[in-house]
Image (tube, rainbow, N blue to C red):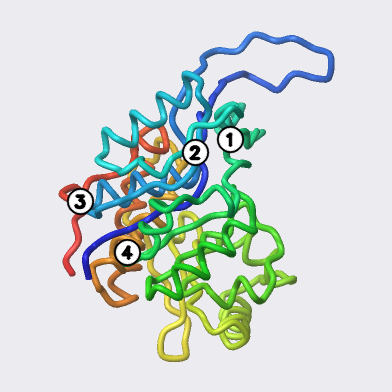
Amino acid sequence: MRNRVTVVGSMNMDLITRTDRLPRIGETILGETIDYLPGGKGANQAVAAARLGCQTEMVGAVGTDAFGDVLLEGLEANGIGTGSVRRTDRPTGIANIFSVGGDNCITVVPGANGTVTPESLDDRAAASIRESDVVLLQLEIPVLTVAKVLAEAKSAGAVTILNPAPAQPLPDSVLAEVDFLTPNETEFELLAGRGFSSDEELALLMSEWEARHGHGLIVTLGERGCAYLEDGGIRFVSPQKVDVVDTTGAGDCFNGALAAGISRGWAVRTSVEFAVAASSLAVTKFGAQEGMPRLAEVAFEE
């Protein structure tokens, strides 16, 4: 394999405000600090893949505003191809994040991400998708675009990974084009239409899902790592113990690292273990993209 990954997805500027508490309706309070950090699931996952040694191309859209400039500069600084990132009249997407006592609430304004329509994909984007080993997508751009890209990537022989976040019901026709689906446990419960309260129930639900949809399912479990099926049984991969600074972007790192492993031709087990090792390091630094580790930092043996 050529170790080429194309990420089709969102690009946001994260505005992180720290406060003692959230304001009530009609109330003004003083915040402690604010940080402006590059984000968006698509961009985060692209940075992860690039830092882990992949030739990475980003397909998406930003505005012609200053936030768009910053996001593009950040991708290019990480060696990511941005020729398929369009500049639009819509403002760059933002995520307003209020951090209160270690917890947070988030409002995302898609902005330019909403313009990543099937019609907006130009010849360069199409070529990048066709020539990739792995095409990685999320659900912060229109689902019609996700469906088109999955179909084109699959027909060209690329491995397709869909991180179904934020979770929403997906038609079987879309899921049929997916090689690996990577929800977290909450997203998986929503997609499956029922919850689970034990590892045994999780294993049964995963088995039913794979039998129905015919693709690999990898469920991320936060500090427990992840679970996937192997030889008819469930297998858990636990992360290493680290000092947690910021969990933002850990799931994005997992997906970017999984794409990196698969693009190298590694087996599923190896790629998953590599993804868990990389995402363990992502939480040791502040900021989603800043925390993405480089290949030399990941203590991992193939």
**Above or below, comparing residue 187 to residue 193 in the picture:** above
3D distance between C-alphas at marks 3 and 4: 23 Å
Q: Residue at x 47, y 52 (%)?
A: 8
Marks 1 and 2: in contact by CB < 8 Å? Answer: yes
Q: Which mark is residue 131?
A: 4
**Above or below, comparing residue 274 to residue 118 in the picture:** below
Residue type at mark 4 is Glu
Residue corresponding to mark 1: 112
Left or right side of 155 for 17: right
Left or right side of 254 for 52: left
Observer-side mark, 2 or 4, equals 4
Q: Going from the N terminus, do you reach mark 3 or mark 2 first?
A: 2
Label 2 crowd (10 A; few <14 / some 14-19 / many >=20): many
Which of the 4 image quadrants contains residue 274? Answer: bottom left
Q: Which mark is residue 295?
A: 3
Observer-side mark, 2 or 1, equals 1
Observer-side mark, 3 or 2, equals 2
Q: Position of residue 183 (x, y in %)?
A: 55, 62
Residue corresponding to mark 2: 11
Q: Going from the N terminus, do you reach mark 2 or mark 1 first?
A: 2
3D distance between C-alphas at marks 1 and 4: 26 Å
**Above or below, comparing residue 226 to residue 89 in the picture:** below
Q: Position of residue 137 (x, y in %)?
A: 49, 57
